[in-house]
Image (cartoon, rainbow, N blue to C red):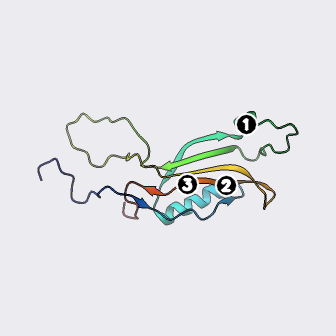
Amino acid sequence: MSGIEPEADVPLPGVWEAPRITKEWHDNWEGFKAYMAEYQADTHQFFRLRSSTSVDHRKKEIKTADGTLLIPKKFTTFWTKLICTHGWRSKSRSTGQRNSYFGNSTECKAEVKAAVTWNDDENKFMVRVTGYSTHHNHRVARTV
């Protein structure tokens, strides 16, 4: 090996698609978190909180005349975005002396978004998965 090629066990670039999220509605944030913990364990994906919006902040944005559609106080968070652990960009601390093929960030775009919304069928506010992408730009497997 000349020192400029990656090791043989470094996976080639590509797109890995994990199983889709099957449960759209959750009674509360605890239910959503429990589902996501099980989903991550079953699919060998790891997401972490990227950003969120509090209910108080959201209420200031959406003032209704009668106040009936305001989000209940039991929901402390209105919206949250989870991203793949490989999606963070971090400043390199490298001095350039060694080649590194195992950087933490691959700028992976896999993400899960959820928000508190009104569920007409249940006639109540619930946490809903509003969008997700399970396309990873790195290998997703138990051994990774």
Q: Which residue is mark 3?
A: 132
How packed is label 3: few (under 14 Cα within 10 Å), some, or many (20 or more)?
some
Residue in the foreground of this view, choosing between 71 and 98:
71
Q: Of the residues shown, which amino acid type is indicated by label 3?
A: Tyr
Q: Earlier in the sequence, mark 2 or mark 1?
A: 1
Q: Which residue is mark 1?
A: 56
| Spatial CA span between label 2 and label 1 | 18 Å
How far across and down, in percent of the image, does residue 8 sit? 21, 59
The part of the image, by quadrant, that contains residue 14 is bottom left
The part of the image, by quadrant, that contains residue 61 is top right
Q: Which residue is mark 2?
A: 128
Quadrant in which the C terminus appears = bottom left
Please say if the residues under marks 2 and 1 sit with CB atoms less than 8 Å apart.
no
Residue in the foreground of this view, choosing between 97 and 61:
61
> Is residue 117 rendered to the left or right of residue 44?
right
Identify the residue shown where x is 37% and y is 47%.
Answer: 106
> Is residue 76 rendered to the left or right of residue 102?
right
> Is residue 55 rendered to the left or right of residue 135?
right
Judged from the image, the secondary structure of the residue bearing numbered disc 3 is strand
How far across and down, in percent of the image, does residue 63 sit? 79, 35
Judged from the image, the secondary structure of the residue bearing numbered disc 2 is strand
How far across and down, in percent of the image, does residue 77 sit? 67, 44
| Spatial CA span between label 3 and label 1 | 25 Å
Identify the residue shown where x is 70% and y is 35%.
Answer: 57
